[in-house]
Amino acid sequence: MPSAIRKIFDNAYLLLILATLAWGGNAVAGKMAAGDWLPFSITSLRWLLVLLLLLPFVYSHLLAERQTLIANAAKMFALGGLGMGGFNLGMYLALNYTSAINVSIEQASMPLVILFLNFMLLRQRVLWQQLCGLAVAIGGVWLTTTRGQPLALFESGLNRGDAIMLGACVLYASYSVGLRWKPKVSWQSFMFCLALCAFLVSVPFTAYELWHQDHPALQAVDWLVLAYVVIFPSLLSQLFFARGVELIGANRAGQFINLVPIFGAALAVIVLGEQFRWYHAVGLLLVLIGIGLAERRFSRES
């Protein structure tokens, strides 16, 4: 490996920033795709291309670990279907009805959903500051999804896109909690199987979508959007984040995920020209304060 690339690949902070920047851009790319790509079709095609690109590099790992993978097929299908398939189907569908800024901020609620699920399902002890963090973050998401009018939720309910995105966040949080039962295989095999399961889950939705809707004519920019979501959020970000975890550990690397909503909101303003309202700023601040309170204990321990 050339020395310049080696220096980049050994810089955990740069890799983690690049990974979260690409993940933040995923909501922007999804919003750009919303006008032309059908949401389920782009999800299926995304994971199919990821599989084709990964296969030459993971084939030997798949052969060596095939018995373990077969024995854990149901577990892998649940993880891939929830984490990669269900989340992305929901996000791309939500972006047809809400803004990329909203979707970016709503993603920031996932660490708190994970905390809640760990308590409800696994009975993990929750400290008072974590409960405070959960309440503050929920307030931030509430403010964002109601566009600065919290009481409107009781009158007209959530916007369809925001409701779908919050459901997608619950799916990804469930996937994150389920990772504790991840089979002991290489990350190459694991990522390939996740992508395969995501593709399989998306196929019925895509078939239904194409049966009931005509696919719009695609322009060159639409194929560039597809190339972006395949190369950056799906492949390079996973590689960069895995390397970052290897260099500085999961606890420290996990803190960088808090940059995703910041990058996403900033890119939505710069690339899409979306308006960054006061309630976006306050909602994002509340979510980040809530995450900081909830993760304070873990930061001390790391």
Image (cartoon, rainbow, N blue to C red):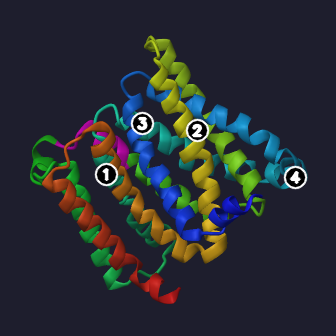
Position of residue 232 relative to residue 190, above or below, is: above
For image coordinates 83% across by 55% down, the residue present is 68
Whether residue 299 appears in this view of the structure is yes
Q: CA distance from mark 3 to mark 1?
A: 15 Å
| Left or right: where 81 falls relative to 123 | right
For image coordinates 62% across by 36% down, the residue present is 47
Q: Position of residue 77 (x, y in %)?
A: 66, 46
Q: Earlier in the sequence, mark 1 or mark 4?
A: 4
Spot the residue most to the bottom. 300
Q: CA distance from mark 4 to mark 3?
A: 37 Å
Q: Earlier in the sequence, mark 4 or mark 3?
A: 3
Residue underneath mark 4: 67
Q: Position of residue 52 (x, y in %)?
A: 73, 34
> Overall secondary structure of the magenta stretch?
helix
Q: CA distance from mark 1 to mark 2?
A: 21 Å
Q: Earlier in the sequence, mark 1 or mark 2?
A: 2
Q: Tag 1's secondary structure?
A: helix
Q: Disc 3 residue type?
A: Gly
